[in-house]
Amino acid sequence: MINNFEGGANQVYEFFSDPVDLSGFTTLAVAFDWAYAQQISSNTDLFRIFISNDCGETWVTKKTYAGTSTLKSVNQFVTIPFTPASLAEWASDTVLISGAANFTDHTQVKFRFESKGGNNFFLDNIRIGRLDELGLHKVETEDLLEIYPNPAQGTTILKWDERVAPESVRLLDSRGRMVFETKDLTDLKSLTIPLEGLCSGYYLVKVTGMDGTHSLPLIVDSGN
């Protein structure tokens, strides 16, 4: 756990894997679970995944999660020190890194959290290796969820892979306020989300299922 609540803004926390021999790899899976909450809407904490093929001399960013959108694992602001109270307050992802140039006999993975004044950050259940060796499926959000049209006006349709097994779907505005929620998803493979009355802007669709919480950005164009 990173004590981001008391640690103050503009702090950087980094975690490294040991150098490992990944010669011959073409794809690497980096899977993990995390939990994070904002204190206020302007908290822009960042979590990044890097890879190095030269024993940490240089690093390449492979994925970034932003505190205002994809990093949030809960939809409400938390103004006391945040600790996840249940599995529903955790999120999970599997980052796939491809390209033979990334993999040498001294490859490293780095996790970096950049504090911008938000709440505590938890990282757990880190797994690094081949997908099949880890017993994982490719579970990146873009492969499990689809939303269209996007940008949208009036309504938008959310479709999901059966592996998601959604238990709830929530729509959050740019300040983290929930503007739509449903748990009536039994036997469904898609959902029409109503957008009438919403202001134009950036929204976040959060789908909580058996394997954690997945998020998709949505742009609403009210036509005004």
Image (cartoon, grey):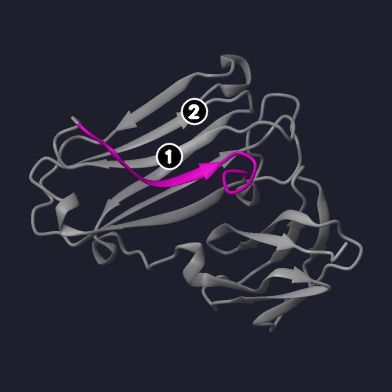
Taking the spot 48% from the left edge, 37% from the top edge, the residue there is 47
Taking the spot 58% from the left edge, 47% from the top edge, the residue there is 90
Residue 62 colored in magenta in the image:
yes
Picture coordinates of residue 60, whole percent (x, y): 29, 42
Q: Which amino acid does label 1 sit on?
A: Arg
In this view, 100 is above or below 177: below
In this view, 45 is above or below 76: above
The segment highlighted magenta reads 58-72
In this view, 220 is above or below 163: above
In this view, 128 is above or below 164: above
Name which quarter of the figure residue 221 lies in: bottom right
Taking the spot 47% from the left edge, 71% from the top edge, the residue there is 143
Name which quarter of the figure residue 201 lies in: bottom right
Q: Name the residue under label 1.
A: 48
Camera-side residue: 8 or 84?
8
Q: Which amino acid does label 2 sit on?
A: Glu
How many residues crowd mark 2 within 10 Å: few (<14), some (14–19), many (20+)?
many
- Quadrant that contains the C terminus: bottom right
Q: Name the residue under label 2.
A: 114
Question: Which mark, by number, is residue 222?
Answer: none
Spatial CA distance of label 1 from label 2 is 8 Å
Residue 50 colored in magenta in the image:
no
Disc 1, disc 2: CB below 8 Å?
A: yes
Picture coordinates of residue 211, whole percent (x, y): 53, 61
Q: Which of marks 1 and 2 is nearer the N terminus?
A: 1
* Secondary-structure class at tag 1: strand
